[in-house]
Image (tube, helix red, strand yellow):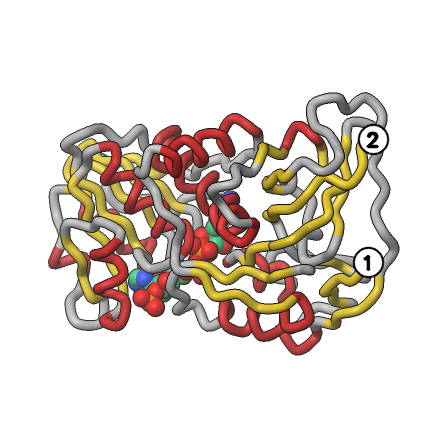
Amino acid sequence: MKAAYFEQHGGPEVIRCGDLPDPLAGPGEIVVDVHAASVNGADCKVLSGRYSRITDFPYVLGRDFSGVVASLGDGVNECAPGAPVFGVCEVGQEGTYAEKIAIKAALVAPKPDSLSHVDAAALALVGLTAVISIEDTLALQPGERILIQGGAGGVAGFGIQLAKHIGAHVIATCSARNIDYVQGLGADEVIDYNARDFAEAVSDCDAMFETVGGDVAERSFAVLKPGGRAAFIASGPTAPQPARGDVTALRPRVGRDRTHLLRILELVEIGAVGVPEIRTFPLADAASALATSAARHLRGKLVLKTR
Ligand SMILES: NC(=O)c1ccc[n+]([C@@H]2O[C@H](COP(=O)([O-])OP(=O)(O)OC[C@H]3O[C@@H](n4cnc5c(N)ncnc54)[C@H](OP(=O)(O)O)[C@@H]3O)[C@@H](O)[C@H]2O)c1
């Protein structure tokens, strides 16, 4: 199979595209012919070695995908060859920047005809992360006020729509060129973070969803009212500790399962969440997609067309 892989840590320039052995389905697994794989914020961190040092090369990036079931391992009877599916690799597994992947059958969901493979791949990990963060972790309620940091990005873009669907008042941050896009996602208020300090412009929030990291994360506690909750996904494995004692800092545990994939589909089906703006790249140009992601000013999603 063709795959985009790397053999040493570095920047997008170390990515190669070439032939690797086809994967085989182990017990409980299926092999999927991947049609589309999304590029996530984490991919450049894995590539650079910032997450952990990889020793088993060649290494194929990619956490989510959409494709067609090619073959079944022992004990799989929940899907059939030819079925369109989408999903997210289990924590610790990657490899969707490829024409094929072997994955646990329990981690995929049927892809509806109403979504293209590109659309489904674009929704998978960001949808899972937003649902787990906003519904399961923050338990956002109707009428609550939430600040979503990084509103034009993949996870936050899904999150804005979900928070509006729940009935919250949504404030989002982004740069000037993305204001129209973020308003189009449904944000009630949009803060251009270069023009105004969000920590002064926003206050009295019940909840905050932080997808940017660094200094933005540390300063975000200021927008919460006493008793407020904050969820952080871009600050490493633990949430930053607040300097104040009257708010809660949470680190969502983004596991993988079919239930949450079905929740994504339900939200799309009822019109609560739409497909983000998507820019596609051929698999052979994965390095360009990663360079775009690494710049950290993406609007919507990047998706690799793998065949
Ligand atoms: N399982 C997990 O825990 C999990 C899952 C998914 C993602 N993540 C992490 O979550 C983060 C976001 O991922 P993603 O894929 O959604 O990112 P992304 O699509 O690459 O989006 C990054 C966004 O951040 C915005 N941004 C940059 N600087 C900003 C600032 N100072 N204030 C406000 N917005 C700013 C950019 O918009 P502008 O151009 O408008 O600045 C861009 O839209 C990444 O760090 C990723 O690793 C964690």
> First in sequence: mark 1 or mark 2?
1
Q: Quadrant of ligand 1?
A: bottom left
Give the image quarter of residue 191.
Answer: bottom left
Count neighbours of disc 2 (C-alpha within 10 A) and say few if under 14, some if 14 to 19, many if 20 or more. some
Residue 214 visible in the picture: no
Q: Residue at x 59, y 62 (%)?
A: 304
Give the image quarter of residue 52.
Answer: bottom right
Q: Are marks 1 and 2 in contact (CB under 8 Å)?
A: no
Amino acid marked by disc 2: Gly
- Give the answer, above or below, for where 220 lies relative to 13: above
Q: Position of residue 219 (x, y in %)?
A: 27, 55
Q: Position of residue 66 (x, y in %)?
A: 60, 46
Q: Residue 2 or 44: which is nearer the viewer?
A: 2
Q: Classify mark 2: helix, strand or loop.
A: loop
Which residue in the rendered view is the most extreme toward the bottom? 13
Q: Which residue is mark 2?
A: 73
Q: Which residue is mark 1?
A: 1
Q: Residue at x 56, y 38 (%)?
A: 111
Q: Position of residue 80 (x, y in %)?
A: 73, 30
Amino acid marked by disc 1: Met
Q: Residue 40 or 251: which is nearer the viewer?
A: 40
- Give the answer, above or below, for where 49 lies relative to 292: above
Q: Residue at x 61, y 54 (%)?
A: 36
